[in-house]
Image: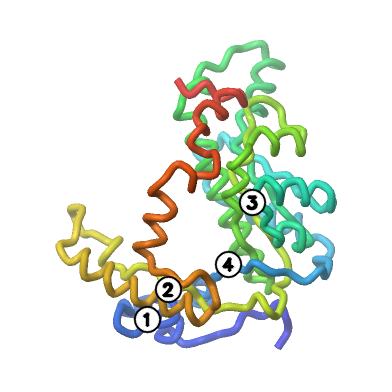
Amino acid sequence: MNESTPITTSKAEALTRRYGVDSRPAAGPWNDHIELLLSHRSVRGYRPDALPEGTLETLVAAAQSAATSSNMQTWSVVAVTDPAAKAALAKVASNQKHIEQCPLFLVWLADVSRNQRLAAEERVELVAPAYLEAFLVAAIDAALAAQNATVAAESLGLSTVYIGALRNDPLEVREVLGLPDGTMGVFGLCVGYAAPEAANEVKPRLPQPAVLFRERYGNPDEPALRAGYDAKLAAFSRRNEMVQDNWTRRVINRMGSLAAMGGRDRLADIVRAMGFPLK
């Protein structure tokens, strides 16, 4: 099979891989695109192989086809291939080596600076960029664009993993990439061909009744749903040689202390320093 051809499975198999047999939802309307979405997995090991000519431009075209609030397009992306720059960004992100391994590392920016430059050239003042809403819209725009690029990459037989740990030190990211005020690297994205040893299963997600509510929020069965998911994720971790843990402990370990935030407890002050007043 060609490397750019996604592997096809039946509806039931795709849903089972994502949820498990016991939590598999009913299979509704279906197509190859939905099947591709359900096959997503994060990959943390890459071959050094170069990407085909024009891949970056194709991914950005897909990204620019995502929804953007009021067509303000308050995002940008920096494509990083220089080994020294990738090494510096990997250091920010707790030394995640796959940043250095992947042939293409994309840093997605919340970016109101372009619209501020537009205003300066037009000799008008923009009031909205000083408010929290502007930063939130820019971060959401960047996430929507990046997810489109991720789906496009996976449709081409490439693998990806998001790197939220760039937010450990946004000021250093700014220094490495030469970012102006009004921009911030909100996350990174590794893109490349998966190394054989990095192959893993589709990671199970919470059962749909834990996240899908009808008319009003909540499900009285949440404790039981969580217990079932804990067992499922712990088994996945054992099979894939990851940290032997269930979902409940992961949440507590990740959100139970400031130390686990890797410096991101100071993020509001840092975002202000980068030109987003957050009024």
Disc 1 to disc 2: CB gap under 8 Å: yes
Residue on which the image places disc 4 = 42
Q: CA distance from mark 3 to mark 1?
A: 32 Å
Q: CA distance from mark 2 to mark 3?
A: 25 Å
Instruction: Answer with left or right where residue 16 lies relative to residue 164.
Output: left
Q: CA distance from mark 1 to mark 2?
A: 7 Å
Amino acid on which disc 3 is placed = Ser
Disc 4 versus disc 3: nearer the observer: 3
Q: Residue at x 40, y 86 (%)?
A: 12
Circle 2 packing at 10 Å, graded few (<14), some (14-19), many (20+), is: some
Callout 3: helix, strand or loop? loop
Q: Earlier in the sequence, mark 2 or mark 4?
A: 4
Residue on which the image places disc 3 = 94
Q: Earlier in the sequence, mark 3 or mark 1?
A: 1
Relative to 256, residue 245 above or below: below
Q: Earlier in the sequence, mark 4 or mark 3?
A: 4
Query: Residue 273's image quarter?
Result: top right
